[in-house]
Image (cartoon, rainbow, N blue to C red):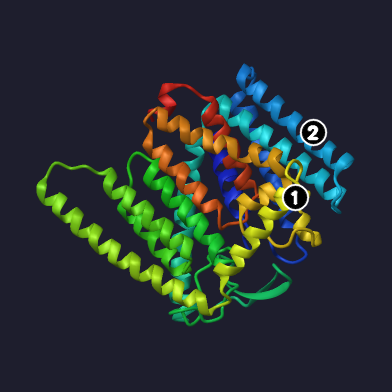
């Protein structure tokens, strides 16, 4: 029962990451996903933790986080000079705090964060295989007919093609070499899908003890079909790290490894240049991201302690966000930014001190992925923050020498 619940918890966390299901117009499935996730998490705590007492350092950490979130909300009510939605800030603060408390308590009490990552990776590989099937034989070759259109609300109402409600094509316009659009899987945009795929790939390479090549290939092909610049670059970084992770003694293998590295480097350089040239002619997304990033940091320095308020971009304050990092500091100030990123950085330093370089590489890749992706308030993002807190609090050698 426990394993079923944790897998449901993993599936919901991935689906909540800006998927088509969450964005279906008029369905409010995002609220249902939050409800399912919280109920599942509570049941996991009941079944797995039972009457186990909370550890002292976990208790102090949770107390500190709760006090800081309360102070953030109080300061914003009393001193903020910026127009914002009090209701939105109250709801986001309560949900974020409650959910983060539950996640930290569950992972810290049971040391199950790495196991959760395994479930995440397994589900992502299934999604990847399904999306490739429909992307090739449905979206491009038209051998599998689509099942009509569904209405979503993402930057306004839009109709998107679907295949068996398992694959969608919200970005159907020709893009680079793909006449019928990029591979977005079940997500609203290709970059969101690329984030998920790269996360799964980094878990396979850095967290799991035994990596299956066929799984890496499925993820790698899927990442390429998203035509995401970040996805391509990050996947190449992961592949390089994976190659150097293997240190065989046979001389022939070492020669092959060098040849493969050269080949990968050549292909990588070509792909990055090709994607960059095309992006310069398609909306110049790089400049848009740079402009949004600069605006976000300017807003942060103008309101460094408490920020502009949660969800301030949705009411026209602060402009659009294209990064989890900049959004966290722009909307939550230094208080929320540190709450969000201290555990990630702490795990990086701790893994370096313990010479657990796999976890260090995983943390670095995760930080890289956060920069061009907006997922600040998603369940998966909060779970990752909570999981990082649990890793940073845990000193058990069997956990760090997995």
State the residue in front, 126 or 311: 311
Q: Looking at the picture, does residue 369 appear above or below residue 349? A: below
Q: Earlier in the sequence, mark 1 or mark 2?
A: 2
Q: Which residue is mark 1?
A: 302
Q: Looking at the picture, does residue 55 appear above or below residue 360? A: above
Q: Which residue is mark 2?
A: 71
| 73 left or right, relative to 44 | right
State the residue in front, 141 or 94: 94
Q: CA distance from mark 1 to mark 2?
A: 19 Å
Residue at 74% across / 51% down in the picture? Answer: 31
State the residue in front, 134 or 287: 287
Residue 392 is situated, as x and y percent measured from the top left of the image, at: 53, 29
Residue 98 is situated, as x and y percent measured from the top left of the image, at: 73, 36
Residue at 57% across / 35% down in the picture? Answer: 343
Considering the numbered disc 1 on the image, is that residue within a helix, a strand or a loop? Answer: helix
Q: Residue furthest right?
A: 78
Q: Residue furthest left?
A: 251
């Amino acid at each position: 029962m426990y394993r079923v619940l944790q897998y449901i918890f993993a599936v919901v966390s991935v689906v909540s990451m800006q998927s088509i299901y969450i964005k279906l117009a008029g369905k409010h499935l995002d609220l249902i996903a939050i409800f399912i996730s919280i109920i599942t998490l509570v049941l996991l705590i009941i079944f797995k933790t039972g009457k186990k007492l909370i550890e002292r350092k976990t208790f102090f950490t949770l107390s500190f986080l709760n006090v800081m979130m309360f102070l953030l909300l109080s300061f914003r009510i009393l001193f903020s000079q910026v127009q914002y939605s009090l209701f939105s800030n109250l709801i986001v603060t309560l949900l974020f705090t409650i959910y983060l408390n539950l996640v930290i308590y569950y992972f810290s009490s049971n040391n199950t964060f790495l196991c959760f990552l395994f479930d995440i990776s397994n589900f992502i590989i299934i999604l990847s295989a399904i999306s490739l099937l429909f992307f090739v034989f449905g979206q491009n070759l038209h051998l599998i007919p689509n099942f009509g259109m569904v209405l979503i609300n993402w930057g306004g109402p839009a109709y998107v093609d679907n295949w068996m409600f398992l694959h969608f094509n919200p970005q159907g316009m020709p893009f680079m070499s793909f006449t019928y659009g990029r591979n977005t899987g079940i997500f609203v945009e290709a970059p969101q899908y690329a984030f998920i795929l790269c996360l799964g790939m980094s878990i396979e390479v850095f967290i799991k003890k035994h990596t299956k090549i066929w799984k890496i290939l499925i993820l790698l092909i899927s990442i390429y079909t998203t035509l995401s610049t970040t996805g391509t670059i990050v996947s190449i970084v992961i592949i390089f790290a994976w190659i150097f992770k293997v240190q065989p003694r046979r001389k022939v293998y070492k020669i092959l490894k060098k040849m493969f590295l050269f080949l990968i480097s050549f292909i990588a350089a070509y792909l990055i240049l090709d994607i960059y040239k095309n992006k310069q002619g398609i909306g110049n997304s790089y400049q848009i991201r740079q402009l949004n990033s600069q605006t976000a940091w300017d807003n942060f320095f103008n309101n460094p302690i408490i920020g502009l308020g949660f969800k301030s971009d949705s009411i026209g304050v602060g402009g659009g966000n294209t990064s989890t990092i900049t959004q966290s500091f722009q909307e939550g100030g230094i208080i929320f930014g540190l709450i969000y990123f201290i555990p990630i950085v702490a795990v990086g330093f701790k893994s370096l001190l313990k010479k657990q370089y796999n976890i260090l590489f995983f943390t670095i890749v995760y930080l890289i992925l956060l920069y061009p992706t907006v997922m600040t308030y998603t369940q998966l993002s909060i779970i990752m923050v909570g999981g990082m807190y649990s890793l940073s609090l845990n000193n058990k050698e069997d956990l760090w020498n997995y």
